[in-house]
């Protein structure tokens, strides 16, 4: 008879009707998927992206659920699963956009549902790196070549 292993304990947290589009949240979710909770919280705290704040609060809620409801060690948790689904897109928040000749179009204010599952086991499945999964600050200056030194070296010759 095959030996059965107990399923790994998991703790969940849900965020429903977040007032931000799912594509913006998925960009940040892809960056923290599979990481340890400590790494993810540091990344979210210093990310210069608007979508990082609600996800940081959601991860903290999942860690609190793990500690209080399941007696799991909150220092050794991993984000085993994070999903971002679209909520009702425009049915609840209707905004009009004025157009030419007296017409009006509806603006689609998108909502999102996010689910985070944390567990003490690191994820078994290898995480695929996707394009656009970075949450680094957009306003970092690009490195430039030093022209002052090359000009000074040319003047001394």
Image (tube, helix red, strand yellow):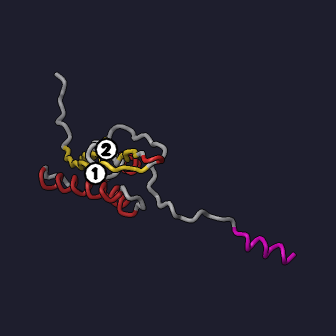
Numbered disc 2: secondary structure: loop
Residue at image location 37% in from the left, 45% down from the top: 106
Q: Position of residue 69 (x, y in %)?
A: 12, 51
Residue 61: percent from left, percent from top: 21, 55
Q: Which residues are magenta?
A: 146-157
Residue 120 vertical placement versus 149 (above, below): above
Q: Nearer the N terminus, badge 1 or badge 2? A: 1
Label 1 with label 2: CB-CB less than 8 Å = no
Tell me which corner region of the image, top left, top right, bottom left or bottom right, holds residue 121.
top left
* Residue 8 vertical position relative to residue 60 in the rendered view, above or below: above
Residue at 84 percent of width and 76 percent of height: 155
Residue 90: which disc? 2
Residue 100 in magenta stretch? no
Name the side, left or right, on which 141 lies relative to 30.
Answer: right
Q: Residue at x 74, y 73 (%)?
A: 149
Q: Could you tell me which secondary element the residue under label 1 belongs to?
A: strand
Q: Residue at x 35, y 37 (%)?
A: 125
Distance of label 1 from label 2 (alpha carbons): 13 Å
């Amino acid at each position: 008879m095959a030996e059965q292993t107990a399923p790994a304990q998991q703790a969940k947290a849900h965020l429903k009707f977040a007032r931000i589009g799912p594509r913006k949240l998925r960009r940040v979710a892809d960056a923290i998927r599979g990481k340890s909770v400590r790494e993810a919280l540091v990344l979210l705290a210093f990310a210069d992206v608007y979508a990082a704040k609600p996800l940081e609060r959601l991860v903290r809620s999942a860690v609190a659920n793990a500690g209080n409801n399941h007696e799991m060690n909150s220092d050794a948790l991993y984000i085993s699963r994070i999903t971002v689904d679209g909520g009702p897109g425009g049915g609840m928040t209707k905004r009009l956009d004025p157009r030419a000749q007296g017409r009006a179009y509806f603006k689609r204010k998108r909502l999102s549902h996010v689910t985070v599952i944390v567990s003490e086991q690191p994820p078994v499945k290898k995480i695929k790196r996707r394009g656009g999964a970075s949450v680094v600050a957009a306003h970092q200056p690009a490195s430039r070549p030093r022209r002052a030194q090359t000009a000074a070296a040319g003047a001394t010759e």
